[in-house]
Amino acid sequence: MTVTDMPPEDADARRAVPPVICYPNDALPVPKPALDRAHQPLQVIETVRVPPRDAGFVRVRAGQVLRILCPDGPQVGDLNLFNAHDLSERFYSGKTRALHGSHVTTGDRLWSCFPYLRPMATVVADSLGWYGRDAFGGAVHDVIGTRCDPYTANLLGGAQYHHCCHSNLTRALSDASGLPLTEAEPHVHDVLNVFMCTGFTADTGQYFMKASPVRAGDYLDLLAEIDLLAVLSACPGGDCSAQHSSDVAVCYPLDMQVLDTKEAAPWSEPPLNSYDRSHGR
């Protein structure tokens, strides 16, 4: 043990200092209008099937519900969200995590990046809400992971693997936007890991994954607060019980369904964040 590793005399006292929540979220408005709207009769108006180890996209109007559905076997998905009219406004997983925690469920909102910082979508139903947090510290639908990508795979193993979630999302966004791959790729961002069961180890603080509890028929419903372009990858890890970015793991499709109701009034999009952007000058 080096001198710098030696604990000081007051080490225990320092460790015993109680934590403080960084962003108390009791000041956030309860998304009651979104939850109420989702409880009205809804009908499926569009379904996009996302093949295993690939991605797809769908556009969702403000006030509609995006349902991510597991139609067959256990499968996790990586979700990117964009303002359908402006790709520079996109999902901000880090701020969503800071406001709501490491995993999201019913009543939590998915926030957009700076300088917009407004709710893009609200989780209005979660068939895996029963799972909670298990004995390992794992929970479902995380905003802590990034996405499997070809750069890390190349760094760690020298592989050229193209059907990881980052590449899947890049191809699908290119198709949705008409941008070439090189221009679409910088818009791909950290994801909502739908159905993925993850956490951090208590001893080393390492990010872990475990077999997802998702089964055929499970779903996550997101009410679109603004017009959305949703891009979803069916992860090549399948249920992420063992493999990641793999052609060996058993994989299944995912469905993106757009649900709408004829009974609800037109939806009013939340305003852009009102910070004046002067930054002290």
Image (cartoon, rainbow, N blue to C red):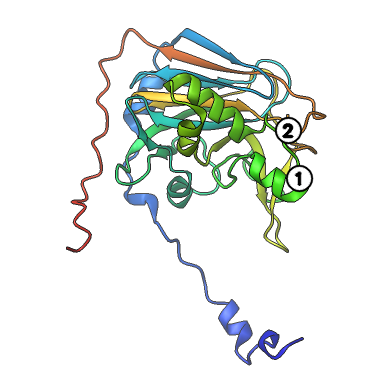
Q: Secondary structure at mark 2?
A: loop
User: Residue 158 — which label?
Assistant: 1
Asked if residue 78 can be seen in this view, the reply is yes
**Quarter-of-image position of residue 141:** top right
Judging by the rendered image, the residue that carries numbered circle 2 is 237
Q: Which one is in front in this view, the residue at disc 2 or the one at disc 1?
A: 1
Q: Secondary structure at mark 1?
A: loop
Determine the residue positioned at 69% across, 21% down: 52
Residue type, label 1: Gly
Determine the residue positioned at 30% across, 14% down: 264
In depth, the one of 259 and 162 nearer the eye is 162
On screen, 143 above or below 121? below
The x, y position of residue 86, in whole percent, is 33, 30
Residue type, label 2: Gly
Question: Badge 1: how crowded within 10 Å, few (<14), some, or many (20+)?
Answer: few
Question: Badge 2: how crowded within 10 Å, few (<14), some, or many (20+)?
Answer: many
